[in-house]
Amino acid sequence: MPIAHLSRRYHFSASHRLHADTLSAAQNQATFGKCNNPYGHGHNYTVEVCFSGPVDPATGMVTNLADLDAFAHAHLLAPFDQTNLNTLALFADLVPSTENLSIELHKIFLTYPHARLERIHIEETPNNSFDYAGPAHLPKL
């Protein structure tokens, strides 16, 4: 059975402050610069999820887009859009960097039952984008 890849994009707006409690105020400022603003700052994120799977001979699809959109609405858009990422429980012990956001979204979309998650791609700004494909794809350091 042929395997195909499907990518779908979602957009949300959120704010965050990059700050590590383990660092001093001076270290936080030196490390995160303007992103350490006590009031935070916002981004219009674009999240691209890429899935793979067999092409269903009856539908011609890897997965039903309505199912994927419903999952994304419940697990991505509803909890993340128009929020301060620092206030979410999943960032209680993590700096809400976009690198960490990509890892956390990967964990969420891994639970989508109808196709195999290949990677998460997040565009934070026109100059910054982040990819995460899971721990199996990490280079050995």
Image: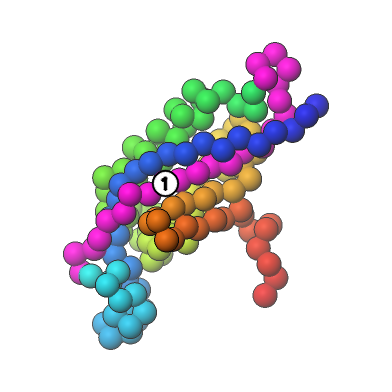
- Residue 87's spot in the image, x, y percent? 28, 55
Whether residue 21 appears in this view of the structure is: no
Residue, far front: 126
Quarter of the image where the C terminus is located: bottom right
Q: Decide which of 129, 73 is in the foreground and name it.
A: 129
107 in magenta? no
**Magenta stretch?**
38-60
Q: Is the stretch drawn in magenta largely helix, strand or loop?
A: strand
Whether residue 33 appears in this view of the structure is: yes
- The residue under the point 67% across, 19% down is 60
59 in magenta? yes
Task: Reply above or below: 92 against 83.
Answer: below
- Residue 86's spot in the image, x, y percent? 30, 59
Task: Reply above or below: 111 against 45.
Answer: above
User: What residue is shown with label 1?
Assistant: 46
Left or right: 41 with respect to 61?
A: left
Q: Based on the displayed image, in which of its 4 quarters is residue 118 positioned?
A: top right
- Residue 111's spot in the image, x, y percent? 56, 39
Residue, far left: 39
- The residue under the point 65% across, 16% down is 59
Left or right: 28 with respect to 105?
A: left
- Residue 74's spot in the image, x, y percent? 40, 33
- The residue under the point 53% across, 42% down is 49
Task: Reply above or below: 37 against 122.
Answer: below
Callout 1 amino acid: Thr
Q: Decide which of 111, 121 is in the foreground and name it.
A: 121
> Element under label 1?
strand
Q: Based on the displayed image, in which of its 4 quarters is residue 39 positioned?
A: bottom left
Residue, far top: 58
